[in-house]
Amino acid sequence: MADIVKELAGIEMPEYSEDEKFKLEVGITYKGSFKLKQDGQITVRPYKQGTKPGQLKKVVDGDQHAIFESRNLLRIVFTIPKTNMEQVRKRFKEEFFECYKDLCELEL
């Protein structure tokens, strides 16, 4: 589970323009998301690994949340079991307040 949380914290979500062009090369595996529009056009959004996420260190390891820190970045990751939406919302609310308490105790 800790490896999954670290991997999720390391995903960089850069600003992205749908007009941005990129070139796909033969033989390379790409990670990303694809969206099929009503007119049949496929929109591709590649994931980009940044440099900051590799410098993150875990400063809080809660039951269902973790807080990572780098020089200029705080990243909070929630991991909640997938059940019905009412239970997910309730669990998120509980974990959010626990995370908030942890944030109040951190010295930045």
Image (cartoon, rainbow, N blue to C red):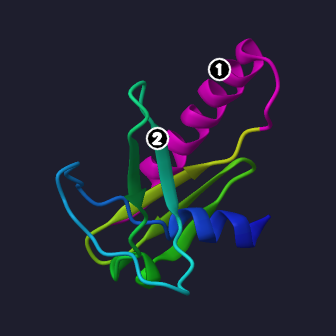
Residue sitting at x 27%, y 70%: 22
Residue 105, horizontal then vertical, whole percent: 47, 54
Which label lies toward us, 1 or 2?
2
Find residue 39 and report its image quarter.
Answer: top left
Q: Secondary structure at mark 1?
A: helix
- Please report whichever mark, 1 or 2, sits nearer to the chain's N-terminal start: 2
Find residue 2 and report its image quarter.
Answer: bottom right
Residue 8 drawn above or below residue 83: below
Residue sitting at x 50%, y 71%: 10
Region of the chain picked out in magenta, as a range: 81-108
Residue extending furthest toward the top: 86
Contact, CB < 8 Å: mark 1 with mark 2?
no
Dot 1 corresponds to which residue? Answer: 89
Residue sitting at x 35%, y 77%: 50
Residue 49, horizontal then vertical, whole percent: 41, 75
Dot 2 corresponds to which residue? Answer: 35
Of 31 and 49, the residue lying toward us: 31
The N terminus sits in image quarter: bottom right
Of 77 and 20, the residue lying toward us: 20
Tell me the kind of residue under disc 2. Answer: Lys
Q: Is residue 107 magenta?
A: yes
